[in-house]
Amino acid sequence: MDLLAKRLGSINFSQTLAIGQRAARMRAAGHDIISLGLGEPDFKIAENIRSATAKAALEGHERSGPVEGISELKSAVVRKLNRENGLSYEPEQIVIGAGSKQIIFNAMMATLDPGDEVIIPAPYWVSYPDIVRMAGANPVTVPCTSQLGHKITADMLNSAITAKTKWFILNSPSNPTGAVYRADELHALAEVLRARPGILILSDEIYEKFVYPPAKFASIAGVAPDLRDRILTVNGPSKTYSMIGWRIGYGAGPVELIRGMMRIQSQVTSSTCTIAQIGTAAALLGPQESVAATIADYHERRNLVVELASRIRFFHAIPPDGAFYLFPDCSALIGASTRDGKVFKTDVDVVDYLIDVAGVVTVPGSAFGMGPALRMAYTCPRDRLEVAFDRIATALDGVRH
Ligand code: PLP
């Protein structure tokens, strides 16, 4: 009997989550593991968010709310988009989901037909291609090398578009490379999309706040307001406020799309945890000073990992402008052998070796559609980052071609 659907043949278990589980198992077994694997910020959730959430639970907000999200959070999102991004939306253009991941899933399920294509610049966040395939369509990945700063150009986008293109997915700042699109680069992409009215644009802005000067964040909906009727702006509190476990995300876009997404959500989760939504409204409406302090700290960590990685002769990394990942190319390791005779054939071999020998968890670039490379999340304290890179250097000492 075939227990599982054929559909699963093309769906992977999220490799980042798999590696996170492996690190947790090794830690539970007593190993001293430093995880540069999962992209979970390590700072504490602000007190006002915790207390608003606890109060909501104690007050008994236990009934399910509206499919599209509670009005308190939707209006907080409207205010946030206005205040921070200069974007004006009506509450009916907003939908709340269980993480921005679910928002992206709902959007794809609501719009894609078999044979449709979705353009995804690579390296990409692991889930985009799988979500597109789950919705029965085809991901079209466009390799964006380090020479291009890992960013798609207008010409590359233009060449990737076909009559079947339904979406273009943009993720700035990017997971896994930290690339940040400048406003002029977004203008150029918008120019291409302007000439192709049938294409929807998903702008995943979850790392919006993690941008290191002189880089500046720009949102395509702000840069190209005339395209707003086909842009879905996606964001959430997981990274900015360290609220990953709250599982809240939101989308802002044209009403027809939002209603389509609600139809999917109504049959999948009904609605999103009310208590977590109340906590998120507190995050968006409350004081923002702690966010700025966090970003300053991550900026220092970013400078530190760039410096530490530059000492490892097998790594070649461009300094990321945003997010909290370093994405060093490790092709210099491929074909090389370790002191005990192990030969690295792929970046997965490198990741396995660093876990086993150095106790340091990273994720293979190939999981993000571009290898051989490593994705290293600098979401742990600076002293642990230093230990991690020391251990990597020791593990790779003596590696030869
Ligand atoms: N988009 C990107 C680029 C991400 O890196 C992540 C999580 O790592 C998400 C979306 C999903 O975040 P969440 O579902 O917690 O909002």
Image (tube, rainbow, N blue to C red):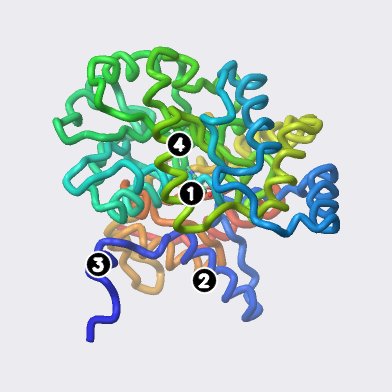
The amino acid on which the numbered mark 2 sits, given as a three-letter code, is Arg
Task: Determine the secondary structure under disc 4.
Answer: helix
- The circle on residue 258 is 4
2 and 4 marks in contact (CB < 8 Å): no
Task: Determine the secondary structure under disc 2.
Answer: helix
Q: Earlier in the sequence, mark 3 or mark 4?
A: 3
- The circle on residue 22 is 2
2 and 1 marks in contact (CB < 8 Å): no
Q: Earlier in the sequence, mark 2 or mark 1?
A: 2
Give x and y (percent) for residue 295: 68, 34
The amino acid on which the numbered mark 4 sits, given as a three-letter code, is Ile
Q: Residue furthest bottom?
A: 1
Residue identifier under label 3? 9
Q: Quadrant of the C terminus?
A: bottom left
Q: Which one is in front, 40 or 146? A: 40
Give x and y (percent) for residue 294: 73, 37
| Label 2 environment density (alpha carbons within 10 Å; few <14, some 14–19, many ≥20) | some
Closer to viewer: mark 3 or mark 4: 4
Q: Earlier in the sequence, mark 2 or mark 3?
A: 3
Would you say residue 306 is visible in this rendering? no
Q: Along the horizontal axis of the image, is 225 left or right of 210?
A: left
| Label 1 environment density (alpha carbons within 10 Å; few <14, some 14–19, many ≥20) | many
Residue identifier under label 1? 101
Task: Determine the secondary structure under disc 3.
Answer: helix
- x 47%, y 51%: residue: 265
- x 59%, y 20%: residue: 85
Closer to viewer: mark 2 or mark 3: 3
